[in-house]
Amino acid sequence: MIHKEGYPTLIVTAIILAAVAYLGYRYIPKPYGIIAIAFSVIFYGFFIQFFRNPTRIPPDLPNSVISPADGKVVVIEKVFEKRFFNKEMMQVSIFMSPLNVHVNRVPFDGKVVFSKYHEGKYLVAFHPKSSDLNESTTVVYEHSSGKQVMVRQIAGAVARRIVCYMKEGMEVKCGDEMGFIKFGSRADIFLPLDAKIKVKLDDICKGNITEIAEL
């Protein structure tokens, strides 16, 4: 399944690549014209896989925080979160390469209590300061237990568009679409200090599948 955010990009890209392939086949001597066509097909295949939106059923773990993103765990540390909580939290960060699924999902059943867009820079997503300096959106979810967890979508050096569907007051379910980030990015999860972390550095997470922590 292709995510709805991908259709405008895919249509424009298809038109451009079709023109490149036609001109290459028509005016470039063989076999270079054939190579131009092959390149167009491969390049378009990359765009299609980037906007894929696989169907996934989250595990039945009502007290757990399920990964909001696909990617690699690059940070697990105690930090001072200053945008909403103003206290120490446990941060788990997931780096999404251009090959990962880039749909972001709600980590548990609950309610959106805070949602805000932040302008910023476009440092590479694995840069230590990208969490604070890059363009991002911040969403805080409240669990039925009353505990709150923040998920921050962060733009990278290539990703220049963050889409977030969350609005304050929304009632959400685990696995609902939180948003989408285009072309390589990062998701930071801020958890209460007493949360039991279930992942390790360099673990590969699957959005809507991997258990990040137990509240």
Image (cartoon, helix red, strand yellow):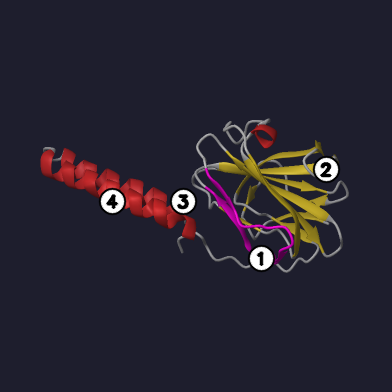
Indicate yes or no whether the magenta region holds residue 162. Answer: yes
The residue range painted magenta reads 161-181
Could you say where residue 107 lies in the image, as x and y percent from the top left? 70, 58
State which tag comes first along the sequence, 2 or 4: 4
Q: Is residue 95 visible?
A: no
Question: Looking at the image, do the residues carrying marks 2 and 1 touch, with CB atoms under 8 Å apart?
Answer: no
Could you say where residue 172 lies in the image, as x and y percent from the top left? 70, 65
Could you say where residue 148 lies in the image, as x and y percent from the top left? 81, 54
Which residue in the protein does label 2 denote? 89
Dot 1 crowding, Cα within 10 Å, few <14, some 14–19, many 20+: some
Disc number lying in front (4 or 3):
4
Question: Looking at the image, do the residues carrying marks 1 and 3 touch, with CB atoms under 8 Å apart?
Answer: no
Amino acid at dot 3: Phe
State which tag comes first along the sequence, 4 or 3: 4
Instruction: Please tell me whether mark 4 sits on a helix, a strand or a loop.
Output: helix
Amino acid at dot 4: Ile
Which residue in the protein does label 1 denote? 58
Q: Nearer the viewer, residue 174 or 75?
A: 174
**Left or right placement of residue 85 versus residue 189 in this view:** right
Give the Cα distance between marks 2 and 1. 25 Å
Amino acid at dot 1: Pro
- How many marks are shown on the rendered structure? 4
Amino acid at dot 2: Met
Disc number lying in front (2 or 4):
4
Give the Cα distance between marks 4 and 3. 18 Å
Indicate yes or no whether the magenta region holds residue 135. Answer: no
